[in-house]
Amino acid sequence: MRPDAVIIMAAGRGLRLRPLTIEVPKALVVCRGFPLIEYACEFARHVLDGTGNIAVVTGYGGDMVKEYLEVEATDAIVLHNEKFEKGNILSLQKGLSFRPKSFLLMNVDHIYPFAFAKRLLEARGAVVAAIDTDRSLGADDMKVKLGGNGKILKISKTLDDYDCGYIGMTLVREEGLQLYMQALDHVLAVKGEMACAEEVLQAIADMGGEVSVCDLSGLCWLEVDTIEDLIRAEEVLVEKDVLNLRFEFEHV
């Protein structure tokens, strides 16, 4: 079943993409002819397939992103996180403020092929985190340790012992929403406004809940967080049908 909404977190400054983000927010950085927010919205449309809502959470440069969406993505709901300098858990909270019954959470700086959607929507579980096992993880990558039941036991950038990497998407179905919201409230109460969204998944595990995983290994995806990432993304993306994201990736 498709989610009720796709929430795109697009509040960041994109400091590591400077000088490109001196005058525009990360969401409007152009990659092979299109801003990152366009890729995110196109993927969201494919996931929803004509149903549900796209919610874009803005922050730094929010007026510019809103102006772009009002012309190029009139189907998107724009929500503004005034505290974008703090942890992105506040963008998550803002994205949930219109109370969707289920949702897919994603980041604006990730470019996903449409093939991700089918595999993720077919995955079992009330809360499902997208992971992969076919890339080398660096210090800034979110790492995941699985328990004996195949569910998430630990998730953190600082793990020394891990099984896979988190790739920035979490699917929360209607039956998992209450638990997810309880975990969100718990993280905010305990760790405050500087917490990150992934800590909600850790809180669910700590509370005895289950976070299932969907392995998307073999399906190349792109992160655009640095100038080097952007250069690589532009090299990897094939020009044919880029906007619709029905492209094939070169295996690099």
Image: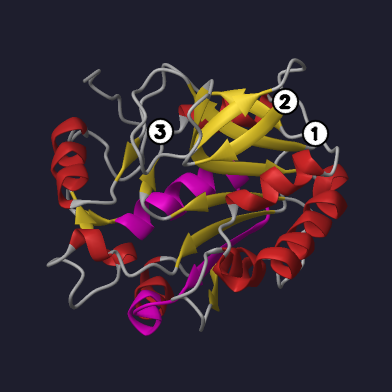
Residue type, mark 1 in image: Glu
Q: Determine if the magenta segment contains residue 47.
A: yes
Q: Is residue 166 above or below residue 45?
A: above
Other-residue count near label 3 (Cα within 10 Å), few / some / many at <14 / 14–19 / ≥20? some
Residue at 52% across, 79% down: 80
Residue 56 visible, this orientation: yes
Residue to which mark 1 is pinned:
210
For the residue marked with disc 2, what is the amino acid?
Lys
Q: Could you classify mark 2 by the number of other residues whose Cα lies within 10 Å: few (under 14), some (14-19), or many (20 or more)?
A: some
Q: Are marks 2 and 1 in contact (CB under 8 Å)?
A: yes
Magenta range: 36-65
State which tag comes first along the sequence, 1 or 3.
Answer: 3
Q: Is residue 90 magenta?
A: no
Which residue is label 2 attached to?
Answer: 151
Q: Which residue is mark 3?
A: 113
**For the image shown, how many numbered marks are present on the structure?**
3
Q: Position of residue 10 (x, y in %)?
A: 44, 64
Residue 58 location (% of width, % of height) = 46, 73
Residue 45, above or below 184: above
Along the line of sight, which residue is nearer the eye, 137 or 74? 137
